[in-house]
Image: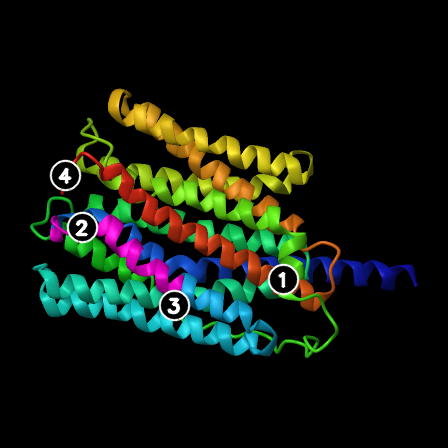
Amino acid sequence: MGGQVTNGAAIQIKGKYAAMVVCWLLGVGCLLPWNSMLTVEDYYMTLFPRYHPARILSLAYQPFNVGTVAVLTYNEARINTRRRNLCGFSIHFTSTLLVLVVDLASSGKGGIGPFIALCAISGAFGFADAHVQGGIVGDLSFMLPDLMQSFLAGNAASGAFTSGLRLVTKAAFEKSKSGLRKGSADLAAAGIQTQIDEQDEEDSKKMERLSHAELLTQNIDYAIGLFLIYVLTLSVFPGFLSEDIGKHSLGEWYALVLIATYNVWDLIGRYVPLLKFVRLKSRKGLMIVILSRFLLIPAFYFTAKYGGQAWMILLTSFLGLTNGYLTVCVFTSAPNGYKGPEQNALGNILSAFLMSGLFAGVVLDWLWLIGKGW
């Protein structure tokens, strides 16, 4: 009898770790296509120097992302989450292929036509991400916190992976006549992924549950916290780090190194809460830390103006570390104490506020250009 219990526990543990791996892969797949485009900003800056691609492409992404997730969150109780996720991954796959098609069709010559096409593809990425992020976060919200942490870590891992691959491809093709284009094409190809199927969801959404308004009222601090985390992050990354950090000894590698640094520390930050004694659970404590993080704005401003590249790398590391850490702390703390359907709805609501923060941050990022001309 004791042996059967031991075997059952071992199977349960193996199942848990297998689920964590699947959630991590889903997290990678959610943002890999978009990060593939994001980490070749040096190529787009060379191809479209007049159009501020580091800022415009992000701005094209966000309205479709926020608008779609708002509609899906409002109707989440009537939507089949499995189909929603499959739709999102299918659009990701198709849009990633189109990035390569646009580059091949234009022969890497730039111009307003290819740039508009890339903006449209960025919008498609935002539309797809709204389907996938909210859907998976909603489903994972009523499961184990470890599964949510694995999914969020996978999100960050996609950025670290694409940044690392971009550094490799840039080094490999740096002396080639069309090195930037070749490296970017290789990275886009790496972002192409297959559709990932999921298990059918239980038909539990028909149970009696709190309304969206009631859930938001009870968790308004978590929602505002996520909004503020990403307002700050996206007001600096990637636009400011790509265009406004001056000239340093790293030359054209500088922006790539900063973006890679952010992505790596964002990934590390999402694993830090696994250490239970450093996971921040206090609602008041989370808000204090989130608000204190806005001191990074003047820190980045004065470092870009007067500091060296070592200080900028240090600040960027802290930006990524705190972004990943606080994201996991909020998402793993908020859904506790609710029924399954309510946790699903709350996960969607929090995702909507996160993406709204992304949008607001991208818009505010343009303020760095005040006084610099166009």
Front residue of 271 and 55: 55
Front residue of 103 and 53: 53
Residue that carries the numbered disc 2 in the rendered image: 43
Q: Is residue 285 left or right of residue 323?
A: right
Q: How many marks?
A: 4
Q: Secondary structure at mark 3?
A: helix
Name the spot of residue 60 as percent of width and height, x first. Answer: 29, 60
- Magenta residue span: 47-65
Q: Amino acid at mark 2?
A: Tyr
Q: Amino acid at mark 4?
A: Gly
Q: Quadrant of the C terminus?
A: top left
Question: Residue drawn at (63%, 76%), measured in percent from left and top?
Answer: 201
Residue that carries the numbered disc 4 in the rendered image: 373
Dot placed on the residue nearer the N-terminal end, 3 or 1: 3
Name the spot of residue 255 as percent of width and height, x first. Answer: 26, 38
Dot placed on the residue nearer the N-terminal end, 2 or 1: 2
Question: Residue drawn at (24%, 62%), measured in percent from left and top?
Answer: 119
Q: Which circle, 2 or 1, is nearer the viewer?
A: 1
Q: CA distance from mark 2 to mark 4?
A: 22 Å
Q: Secondary structure at mark 2?
A: helix
Q: Residues within 10 Å of mark 3 (few under 14, many from 20)?
A: many
Q: Amino acid at mark 1?
A: Ala
Dot placed on the residue nearer the N-terminal end, 1 or 4: 1
Residue 360 seen from this side: yes
Q: Amino acid at mark 3?
A: Phe
Name the spot of residue 325 as percent of width and height, x first. Answer: 54, 40
Q: CA distance from mark 4 to mark 3?
A: 32 Å
Residue that carries the numbered disc 3 in the rendered image: 127
Dot placed on the residue nearer the N-terminal end, 2 or 4: 2
